[in-house]
């Protein structure tokens, strides 16, 4: 479970995240929805401990991520905004490397790696260097190394960005699987359909603030729009801006 | 470092070395930097030895040797001089560099000589060619000596002391003797070996810091619970390994090379035997951790591989300054110098190669000082990995 309370982050004059609070529950998928530049990535970066909030609290399974980032990292699996790979290593080596950094070794690591490769349908490309991988194959590799330690909480920053239809489907499948296994999944997206298809809870963020949150049905009711995309546009104030 | 941190550092180190070993460019760099020193030294010495030999055994082609049998006999008696028949077209032979010098003795030599008139000897050479200058000079000096010897004899025959015809006596003091030039070349060895250590580590140092930023893999790496110290430490260990590899290969090649260079031909008593090799390695290997630590610290500020490499080239020039100053004898040898990185290695290596006895504790203390300093720098690098500007600033 992830709880965020009154999170703030400023870059100079810009309030990138301005008082954000929400909770991502266990066994549920929470979507952080917002247009580009809304503060999604900044919020997630604070959540996955690489950025220090100016103000506010972050609890990962009840553990304060600001004061104990190391402890929080053990409970997090993260697909960051920038998920670069090492071109000269194979997919399997990527998974192994991150597994070992998490402290997993021996047969345990081998089993986890094998399991992930099968789950992500990567067995055929497991021992190829990632230099020649397609965008989808790269995302799968990055995802596999992010969850090699079977973390309770999974954070994905725009996991389907730039993927083709088949790869997007595969990622969705994984998110559903993780949810079914009782994980907390929090992912960000600017694509309405994606969020509505997957999420139990949607948190709409615009200009660093949360403008609405709730189940897809809640949002429809709040805005009076039957179409979620209209609801999103209304909530994020995009029409007023343009 | 706690044992789990050490284990994680080892994981990082192994990954970096695997990654490095698959990069043809990095392997090429290490090989090239290792070969660089021995090849340069080898070429310089062979060149020097050749020139020396050229002076020792000079073949002088003479056209018209029959015109001056006494002169030719005298020349033949000079050590290292061999008289051979000259080519039919001397000027063409010199112009096309088939010969360095050709001596022409004209037909009227004997007639003028017996009449005590200046008898001409023509030396054909190419003044624009650097390589044969010494040889031409040597031949010219021979003729001048013969000329003054005969002149003295003529004066004595006329009852005049030959000394009166020598109002000024010139004594040449040649400072750039072959020995001295060889010593200068040997003085460059410490400097060149430090460059080998530097270039050997450069690839991992940049790839594992600026490279992580350029590829966008740094976020994912730092989300791991492994402590920053373990991550920076592992990369440092990998870089140190490659720097040391570069030094060892260079040392071994130099060692092999010096078994073949004809140093005794140059009259130099210099040996690079097992003792000197060990001393060189004992001096330079402990510098590697510090070199890599500094490279990594600097490269972490760079957003890309290219940017990092341009920073490091400046660093390379900076590290060469103490060595240059020592080679040019600007720095007098003082005790404190042993304990300053780079200057210390330079001084120690000069001692090692000059066969000065060194107390083993000096090696230990110098090594300990370097490694301790390296740890401080690596901690600072680990600290950089906490900065948001470094992690996200692209």
Image: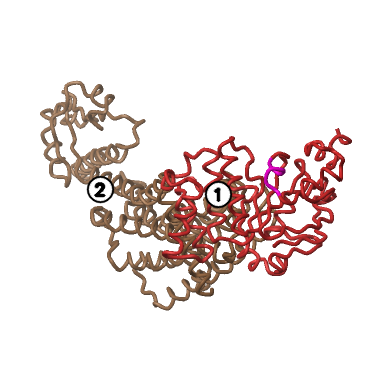
Dominant secondary structure, magenta: helix
Mark 2 touching mark 1, by CB under 8 A? Answer: no
Tell me the brown chain. Answer: B
Magenta segment: does it hold A198?
yes
Q: Position of residue B137 (x, y in %)?
A: 30, 39
Magenta range: A194-199
Magenta segment: does it hold B116?
no
Q: Position of residue B2 (x, y in %)?
A: 53, 75
Establish if A140 lies above or below B294. Answer: above
Question: Does residue A164 appear in the picture of this structure?
Answer: yes
Q: Which residue is found at the position 40% from the left and 44% from the top?
A: B24
Determine which of the numbered discs, if any, sits on residue A142 in the image: 1
Q: Position of residue A216 (x, y in %)?
A: 77, 46
Q: In the image, B59: left or right of B374? A: left
Give the color of chain A as drawn.
red
Q: In the depicted view, which residue is nearer to us: A193 or B361? A: A193
In 3D space, how far apart are the residues under numbered discs 2 and 1 (Cα atoms)? 99 Å
Provide the chain ID for the residue under circle 1.
A
Provide the chain ID for the residue under circle 2.
B
Quadrant of the drawing holding the N terminus of chain A: bottom right
Establish if B193 lies above or below A225. Answer: below
Q: Residue furthest right?
A: A240
Quadrant of the drawing holding the C terminus of chain A: top right
Q: Position of residue B168 (x, y in %)?
A: 36, 47
Q: In the image, B28: left or right of A179? A: left
Q: Say which element carries label 2.
A: loop
Q: Which residue is found at the position 84% from the left and 42% from the top?
A: A235
Q: Which residue is found at the position 23% from the left and 41% from the top?
A: B142
Question: Does residue B288 appear in the picture of this structure?
Answer: no
Q: Residues within 10 Å of mark 1 (few under 14, many from 20)?
A: many
Determine which of the numbered discs, if any, sits on residue B161 in the image: 2
Q: Residues within 10 Å of mark 2 (few under 14, many from 20)?
A: few
């Amino acid at each position: 479970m992830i709880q965020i309370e009154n999170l703030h982050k400023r870059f100079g004059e810009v309030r990138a995240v301005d008082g954000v609070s929400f909770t991502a529950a266990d066994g549920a998928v929470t979507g952080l929805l917002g247009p580009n530049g809304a503060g999604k990535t900044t919020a997630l970066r604070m959540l996955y401990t690489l950025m220090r909030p100016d103000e506010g609290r972050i609890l990962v399974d009840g553990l304060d991520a600001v004061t104990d980032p190391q402890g929080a990292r053990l409970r997090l699996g993260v697909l960051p905004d920038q998920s670069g790979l090492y071109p000269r290593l194979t997919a399997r080596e990527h998974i192994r490397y991150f597994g070992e950094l998490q402290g997993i070794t021996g047969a345990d690591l081998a089993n986890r790696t094998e399991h992930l490769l099968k789950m992500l349908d990567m067995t055929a490309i497991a021992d190829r260097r990632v230099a020649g991988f397609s965008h989808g194959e790269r995302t799968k590799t990055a995802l596999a190394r992010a969850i090699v330690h079977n973390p309770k909480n999974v954070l994905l920053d725009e996991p389907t960005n730039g993927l083709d239809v088949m790869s997007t489907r595969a990622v969705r499948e994984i998110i559903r699987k993780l949810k079914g296994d009782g994980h907390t999944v929090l992912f960000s997206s600017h694509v309405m359909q994606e969020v509505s298809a997957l999420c139990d809870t949607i948190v709409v963020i615009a200009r660093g603030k949360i403008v609405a949150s709730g189940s897809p049905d809640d949002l429809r009711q709040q805005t009076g729009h039957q179409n979620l995309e209209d609801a999103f546009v209304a909530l994020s104030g995009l029409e007023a801006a343009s | 470092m706690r044992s789990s941190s050490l284990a994680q550092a080892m994981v990082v180190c192994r990954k970096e070395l695997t990654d490095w070993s698959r990069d043809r460019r990095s392997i090429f760099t290490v090989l090239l930097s290792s070969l660089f020193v021995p090849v340069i030294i080898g070429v310089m010495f062979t060149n020097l030895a050749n020139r020396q030999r050229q002076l020792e055994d000079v073949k002088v082609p003479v056209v018209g040797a029959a015109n001056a049998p006494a002169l030719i006999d005298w020349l033949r008696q000079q050590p290292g001089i061999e008289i051979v028949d000259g080519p039919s077209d001397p000027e063409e032979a010199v112009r096309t560099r088939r010969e360095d010098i050709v001596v022409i003795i004209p037909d009227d030599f004997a007639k003028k000589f017996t009449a005590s008139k200046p008898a001409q000897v023509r030396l054909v050479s190419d003044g624009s060619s650097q390589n044969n200058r010494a040889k031409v000079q040597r031949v010219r000096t021979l003729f001048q000596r013969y000329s003054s010897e005969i002149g003295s004899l003529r004066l004595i025959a006329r009852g005049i002391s030959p000394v009166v015809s020598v109002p000024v006596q010139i004594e040449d003091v040649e400072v750039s003797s072959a020995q001295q030039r060889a010593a200068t070349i040997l003085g460059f060895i410490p400097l060149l070996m430090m460059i080998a250590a530097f270039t050997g580590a450069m690839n991992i140092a940049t790839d594992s810091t600026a490279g992580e930023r350029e590829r966008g893999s740094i976020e994912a790496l730092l989300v791991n619970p492994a402590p920053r110290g373990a991550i920076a430490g592992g990369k440092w260990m990998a870089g140190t390994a490659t720097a040391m590899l570069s030094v060892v290969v260079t040392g071994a090649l130099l060692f092999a090379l010096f078994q073949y260079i004809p140093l005794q031909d140059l009259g130099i008593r210099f040996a690079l035997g097992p003792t000197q090799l060990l001393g060189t390695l004992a001096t330079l290997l402990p510098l590697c951790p510090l070199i890599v630590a500094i490279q990594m610290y600097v490269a972490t500020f760079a957003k890309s591989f290219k940017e990092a490499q341009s920073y490091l080239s400046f660093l390379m020039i900076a590290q060469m300054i103490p060595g240059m100053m020592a080679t040019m004898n600007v720095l007098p040898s003082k005790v404190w110098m042993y304990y300053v990185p780079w200057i210390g290695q330079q001084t120690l290596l000069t001692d090692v190669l000059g066969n000065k006895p060194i107390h083993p504790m000096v090696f230990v203390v110098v090594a300990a000082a370097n490694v301790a300093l390296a740890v401080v720098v690596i901690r600072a690098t680990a600290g950089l990995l906490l900065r948001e500007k470094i992690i996200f600033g692209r």
